[in-house]
C-alpha cells in the first residue's frame, strides 16, 4: 500500500484519527489545527521529501476525518470546506505550513524571511479568519 519510513507515516495517521474520535476538543477548528501541528508538523512528517508534492498519508487522514464528519455531522465544529482548504494548502505554498518536512527547516526559513524565531501556523491564522465560511454554524 504505502511505504513507511521509520514507521512515521501510519503512526501519524492512526494517532490522529484516534484522537479525533476520542477527544471532542480535536473536532473544533482550533483543536483540529493543534492536532495537525502536534502530530504531523512538529513530529516531522515528510510532506514533500518522500512524496514530491503532497503526502498521500495526510490525504488519507483528511479523508478519515471527512468520513467521520459524514457519520456524525453535529459532532464537528467545522465542515468539509476546512478539510479542502487544508489539503489545498499542501500544494499552494501560500501558508508556509506544509512547505518543509522538519521543524528545523521551517524555523530556518522563517528566520531567513522574517528575521525572527517566532512563527505561528499561518494556515491556522488563515482558517480562523475564515471561520464563518469553514464552520458548521452557517
Image (spheres, grey):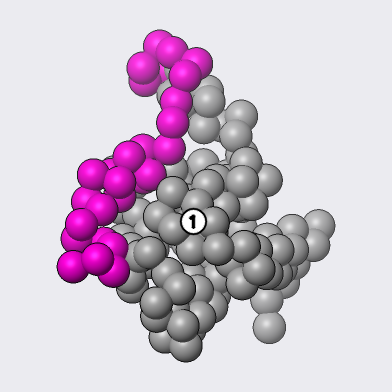
Q: Is residue 116 left or right of residue 18?
A: left
- Residue at left offset 25%, top offset 53%: 131
Q: Name the one closer to the observer, 44 or 74.
A: 74
Position of the N terminus, as image quadrant, is bottom right
Count of picture labels: 1
What is the residue that sits farthest to the bottom in this orientation? 71
Q: Residue at x 49, y 56 (%)?
A: 32
136 w.r.t. 63: above or below? above
Asked whether 116 falls inside the magenta stretch, the response is yes
Image spot of residue 36 (x, y percent): 54, 52
On the rendered structure, is 60 left or right of 110?
right
Q: Residue furthest right?
A: 6
Outermost residue, top side: 115
Q: Which residue is found at the position 33% from the left and 70% from the top?
A: 79
Q: Position of residue 37 (x, y in %)?
A: 55, 46
Does residue 91 show up? no
Examine the rendered structure and indicate whether residue 30 appears above or below residue 72: above
Quarter of the picture containing the C terminus is bottom left
Quadrant hosting residue 22: bottom right
Q: Is residue 118 above or below residue 134?
A: above
Label 1, on which residue?
32
Foreground: 99 or 31? 31
Residue under the image location 79 percent in, 62 percent down: 7
Segment colored magenta:
112-138
Q: Quadrant of residue 74?
A: bottom left
Residue 14, magenta (yes or no) = no
Amino acid at each position: 500500500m504505502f511505504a513507511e519510513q521509520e514507521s512515521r507515516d501510519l503512526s501519524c495517521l492512526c494517532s490522529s484519527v484516534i484522537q479525533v474520535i476520542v477527544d471532542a476538543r480535536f473536532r473544533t477548528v482550533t483543536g483540529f489545527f493543534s492536532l495537525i501541528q502536534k502530530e504531523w508538523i512538529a513530529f516531522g512528517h515528510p510532506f514533500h521529501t518522500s512524496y514530491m508534492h503532497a503526502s498521500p498519508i495526510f490525504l488519507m487522514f483528511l479523508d478519515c476525518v471527512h468520513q467521520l464528519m459524514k457519520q456524525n455531522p453535529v459532532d464537528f465544529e467545522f465542515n468539509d470546506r476546512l478539510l479542502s482548504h487544508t489539503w489545498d494548502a499542501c500544494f499552494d505554498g501560500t501558508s508556509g505550513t506544509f512547505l518543509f518536512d522538519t521543524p528545523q527547516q521551517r524555523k530556518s526559513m522563517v528566520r531567513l524571511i522574517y528575521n525572527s524565531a517566532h512563527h505561528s501556523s499561518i494556515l491556522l491564522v488563515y482558517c480562523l479568519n475564515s471561520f464563518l465560511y469553514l464552520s458548521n454554524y452557517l
